[in-house]
Image (cartoon, rainbow, N blue to C red):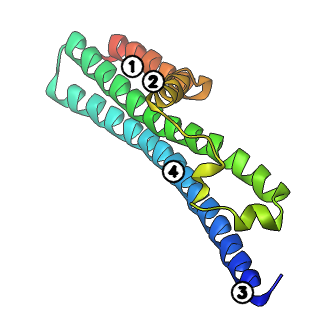
Amino acid sequence: MDENQQRRLEFKRKFVLENLERIKKGHDRAMNNSESVKKWVVTIWFGCIALSLKEGWPASYNLMLLFLIVIMFYLIDSYYIAITIEYSKRIDPIERWIMSAKDEDILNLNSALHDIGPSFGFADRVFCYFSALRNKYVMIFYFILVCISVLLTYLLF
């Protein structure tokens, strides 16, 4: 391998690793957004309870508002979880390819890592979203919020 090809190989190796890092940062950012959504829903949920106690709203209005808040944030949180699922499905094949790639494979790579990882169409993204909606950890968190909402509404109002 001559010096020009060696420089090209090093450039492409660096390029592949930078793309992988970019994908991992996107995954981490989506996970942080999901955690932030959970913090915001708890903050807004408590604020709504405090406001309804102060204003003396009827129990049915309070319960309806709490359900709306929980469902709305559940859908937003599921969106970010779906993004993390999509990123996870991209990271694994890319890492496997990097571990097994020969110099010729890296030199023949013409684009970013789109050739390696799976491409996600509309149906795949919808599947990721519905998988996120059924995520047991997300469902448990929001189910507990709904149960506490019902309990507090009937105890306090």
- Taking depth in this image into account, of 92 and 133 the one nearest to the observer is 92
| Proximity of marks 4 and 2: CB atoms separated by less than 8 Å | no
Disc 4 target residue: 32
- Tell which circle, 3 or 4, labels the residue nearer the N-terminal end: 3
Q: Amino acid at mark 2?
A: Leu
Q: Amino acid at mark 1?
A: Ser
Mark number displayed over residue 149: 1
| Proximity of marks 2 and 1: CB atoms separated by less than 8 Å | yes
Residue at horizontal 23 percent and vertical 10 percent from the top = 60
Disc 2 target residue: 145
Where is 83 relative to 66, above or below? below
Disc 3 target residue: 4
Q: Residue furthest bottom?
A: 3
Q: Amino acid at mark 4?
A: Asn
- Tell which circle, 4 or 2, labels the residue nearer the N-terminal end: 4
Q: Amino acid at mark 3?
A: Asn
Residue at horizontal 33 percent and vertical 27 percent from the top = 72
- Tell which circle, 3 or 1, labels the residue nearer the N-terminal end: 3
Residue at horizontal 39 percent and vertical 19 percent from the top = 149
Q: On the image, which quarter does residue 74 sit in?
A: top left
Q: In front: mark 3 or mark 1? A: 3
Residue at horizontal 58 percent and vertical 37 percent from the top = 85
Q: In front: mark 4 or mark 2? A: 4
SS assignment at label 4 = helix
Q: Position of residue 104 (x, y in %)?
A: 79, 65
Q: Give me the C-alpha separation between circle 1 and circle 4.
A: 25 Å
Q: Dot 1 surroundings within 10 Å: few (below 14), some, or many (20 or more)?
A: many
